Amino acid sequence: MRIGVLTAGGDAPGLNAAIRAIGEMAIRDGHEVIGIANGWAGLANDYTGTSLGANELRGVIAQGGTLLGTARYNLDDPAGGRERVLSAIDEHLDALVAIGGDGTQRISSWLAARGAPVVGVPKTLDNDLQGTDYCIGFDTAISIVAESLDRLYTTAASHHRVMVVETMGRSTGWVAAMGGLAGGADMIVIPEFPVTMNEIVDHLDKRGSAGLAFSIVVVAEGVNLSTLGGVESSELTSEGVGGVRLATRGVGQFVASKIEERGDFEVRTTVLGHLQRGGSPTAHDRIWATRVGAGAYDAVVAGKFGMIPVVRNDGVVLAPLSEVAEGRRKVPREIYDLCAVFF
Ligand code: F6P
């Protein structure tokens, strides 16, 4: 079999572990593994498939990024991109494993519905794909958030300052909530549970009255500015390829300036940005990326197309791509309430 592998959308630590798992298992069984460069662009434009051998896969488990390259490529503009992908798969491959988030899996699901032999692998640093407890990259991201908060605590405490830390999280607050929980944040602001600026400042006042002269406030980049008294761009809801670059909205800086306006606190802002996506994956991401990669390979050889290996109850099971591609998994109330215990 000629098994193509691509990574699409934003990169995430652990992608190489998944590519390695698929590649090494395929080579072991005598199949050919074809690396497609730069996501869907590598199928919709000039076909970029090249054969991957043991040499290309050696040592990559520890490396961040993706050895295949990735892109946010809009297959619907110019029109006909999806049809060109269908033809490229038909012409060059016996199966395709598409590693990516909801945008990628919507395309995978569309292709599979038209009979293309496609299997997905769940990846998004934001951790909000439906139907899976695990997405490649999330564990590394929250480890980086936690370590950053540890470091910010000491300087915040020394200067008696409020530190506002903006994390990734386009539509959901997983990175902010779980990174903030692990790093001992004093307040966490996420899209799922909107708060007003008054509530944020009241909380800081309460901490001040309790003798806590410094605070760390974690804000997810996707928090809607209007609930905080700002003006939201209508582009906020646009997603994926043409989506607004959330970090440029400056929600962290907005919260910081509003806290400072009240006059009682000295405030500094840190935008963690792409530091959360860079560098070597954690052991957790290496292991689970390997497991979902292996699940995808097993699905391919079993001919279970239109499916995606997901993690549920500490095991890997197959789910239909159509289920995973739609909607978003949100931070549940119980996690937010647990975070709030430590505010
Ligand atoms: O979708 C994952 C994500 O990391 C978001 O959290 C963030 O808003 C976005 O990607 C950043 O994308 P880019 O690297 O294209 O600016």
Image (cartoon, grey):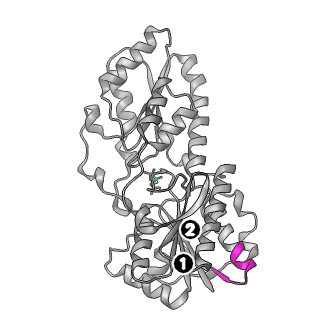
233 relative to 40, above or below: above
Task: Please say whether residue 74 is one of the residues in the magenta stretch.
Answer: no
- Residue 113, located in which quarter of the rendered image? bottom left
Does residue 35 show up? no
Disc 2: which residue: 69
Q: Look at the numbered disc 2 and give the secondary structure of its residue.
A: loop
Name the residue at 68% across, 56% down.
287
User: Which mark is drawn over residue 266?
Assistant: none
Q: Which residues are magenta?
A: 25-35
Task: Please say whether residue 30 is one of the residues in the magenta stretch.
Answer: yes
181 relative to 118, above or below: above
Relative side of 262 to 108, left or right: left
Q: Quadrant of the N terminus?
A: bottom right
Does residue 202 show up? yes
Pinpoint residue 298: horizontal percent, then vertical percent: 63, 73
Name the residue at 55% across, 86% down.
93
Q: Amino acid at mark 2?
A: Gly
Q: Earlier in the sequence, mark 1 or mark 2?
A: 2
Relative side of 272 to 151, left or right: left
Pinpoint residue 185: horizontal percent, then vertical percent: 51, 28
Relative side of 191 to 207, left or right: left
Pinpoint residue 172: horizontal percent, then vertical percent: 40, 46
Pinpoint residue 154: horizontal percent, then vertical percent: 60, 23
Name the residue at 39% across, 53% down.
328
Disc 1: which residue: 96
